[in-house]
Amino acid sequence: MSFTFTKPKAKLTWLITGCSSPSGFGMALTRIALGAGHTVIATSRNPSRTPNLVVEVESNGGRWLKLDVDDRNSGDIIEELEMSGVEIDVLVNNAGFSIFSPVETSTEEEIRGQMESMYFGPLRLIRAVLPRMRKRRYGVIANFSTGGSLEGRDTMGPYAGAKAGLDGITRVLAKEVAPYNIRTLTIILGAFNTDMGVHTVVGKNPLPEDYKGSVSDKMFQFLSSPKSKLPGVNFTMGDKDKAMRAVYEVVLGEGIGTGREAERVIPLGMDMTTRVNGIIESYRHALEAFEHVTNHVAVDK
């Protein structure tokens, strides 16, 4: 079933998580939305560490609030804002970090940490804001994801797994909330000129000797030399500001987003074309390889 989504007002109130980096997606989107006259509530775990960014946002009419998405009570920020008369129209789940570690050597603590930040954290905010959006019959929930959640990449299991989990539950959520004029948008990001590499860490367990020379090993070397090319990947680095302009327009249904209000996924980054096509081809191959089985496992009549 298809739905027609409407936007009840021109200027919206945005709540954006993960705004602590001056060259990150969160701040890029915050600047664009503020510049267009929207109300923006930027958040980060430790605002005191980025006083210049706080001043920039607040001097341009926005607000900055402390928010740790790992906190099990993080959804309270929605309650407090709504009770004070602030109606959240757009929730942007951008906060997160990445641990690079092969699945075999990843600790449960590391994997749970990734799930906490990029699965449970966003879900707490989503579940807190949905009753208000549903009552008002409007809202947009935008989740930032990664190409790694699609085709996987060596050493990115914990990170990609958490993102893929959020992607999966959001696909269901999109169908559940569409009748109430609430949209979901999953932004699948490729390689961009952010400082994400600075915020990635490698797992604490060393690689087994068998992994020496593998792609996982090369990935670790890459992390030690950020200027190197990602092993096995040929891409042109994307411009984060252009990407966030695209996200902004799709959320608003303006510019490139005109007539695309019902779209639920937007892949961004030149490397994503190859990666998405690779996923399509892999599933096509699977169907071809097992078609004789796929269509012949029905209960005998």
Image (tube, helix red, strand yellow):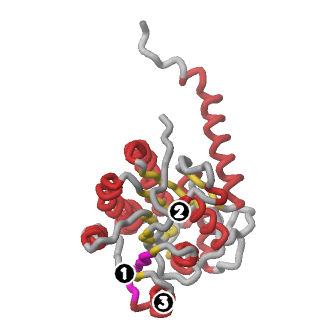
Asked whether disc 1 touches disc 2, contact meaning CB atoms under 8 Å apart, the reply is no
Q: Amino acid at mark 2?
A: Met
Q: Are marks 2 and 3 in contact (CB under 8 Å)?
A: no
| Residue 71 vs residue 292, the one in the foreground | 71
- Locate the C terminus by quadrant: top left
Q: Which residue is mark 2?
A: 156
Q: Is residue 45 magenta?
A: yes
74 on left or right of 146: left
Secondary structure under tag 3 reads helix
Kindly identify which residue carries mark 3.
59
Q: Magenta span covers which residues?
A: 40-47
What label sits on residue 65 in the rendered view? 1
Question: Considering the numbered disc 1 on the image, is that residue within a helix, a strand or a loop?
Answer: strand
Seen in the picture, residue 71 relative to 298 is either above or below; the reply is below
Give the CA distance from mark 1 to mark 3: 14 Å
**Taking 192 as reference, is 1 above or below it?**
above
